[in-house]
Amino acid sequence: MQYQVEENCLTIFLPQELDHHNAEDIRKEADRLIEEKHIKHVIFDFQGTSFMDSSGIGVIMGRYRQIYLLGGEVWAVHANERMKKILAMSGVTKIMQLYEEEKE
């Protein structure tokens, strides 16, 4: 997993498979960066992601709760049709926006 911090925005470049094997690592590192770098906005980049299970949804929901309490926002970018369908079915699209391209 790769992480990029620009000002108060954290971009998380998600792995090919976002499952219970790597969800905990992503959760821990994202939480650490959010706290240490005073992050208010999180972007989940699905560029290379082809699989996500419920633990991946949990990672997104947990970061959303955290960021929402700080008055920030959460976005998803570069989601393929399969990921968009999973996000919509899980209800995540009701709390975060999907973008085809990252905002500059």
Image: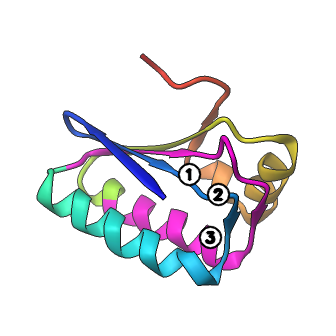
Marks 3 and 2, the one that precedes in the sequence: 3
Residue denoted by label 3: 56
Residue sitting at x 52%, y 25%: 102
Name the side, left or right, on which 96 lies relative to 50: left
Mark 1 neighbour class, 10 Å CA radius: few under 14, some 14 to 19, many 20 or more: few
**The magenta stretch spans residue 78:** no
The label shown at residue 95 is: 1
Amino acid at dot 3: Gly
Name the side, left or right, on which 83 lies relative to 104: right
Q: Residue furthest top?
A: 104
Residue denoted by label 2: 92
Measuring from the top left, give residue 43's x and y in whole percent: 46, 43
How far is mark 1 from mark 3, CA to CA?
Answer: 15 Å
How far is mark 2 from mark 1, CA to CA?
Answer: 6 Å
Residue sitting at x 44%, y 59%: 64
The label shown at residue 46 is: none
Amino acid at dot 2: Val
Q: Is residue 21 above or below residue 83?
A: below
Q: Which residues are magenta?
A: 39-66
**The magenta stretch spans residue 57:** yes
Name the side, left or right, on which 50 lies relative to 2: right
Measuring from the top left, give residue 40's x and y in whole percent: 26, 45
**Can you tell which quarter of the image residue 36 is in?**
bottom left
Q: Is residue 20 above or below residue 95?
A: below
Q: Is residue 85 above or below residue 52?
A: above
State the residue in front, 48 or 31. 48
Marks 3 and 2 in Cβ contact (< 8 Å): no
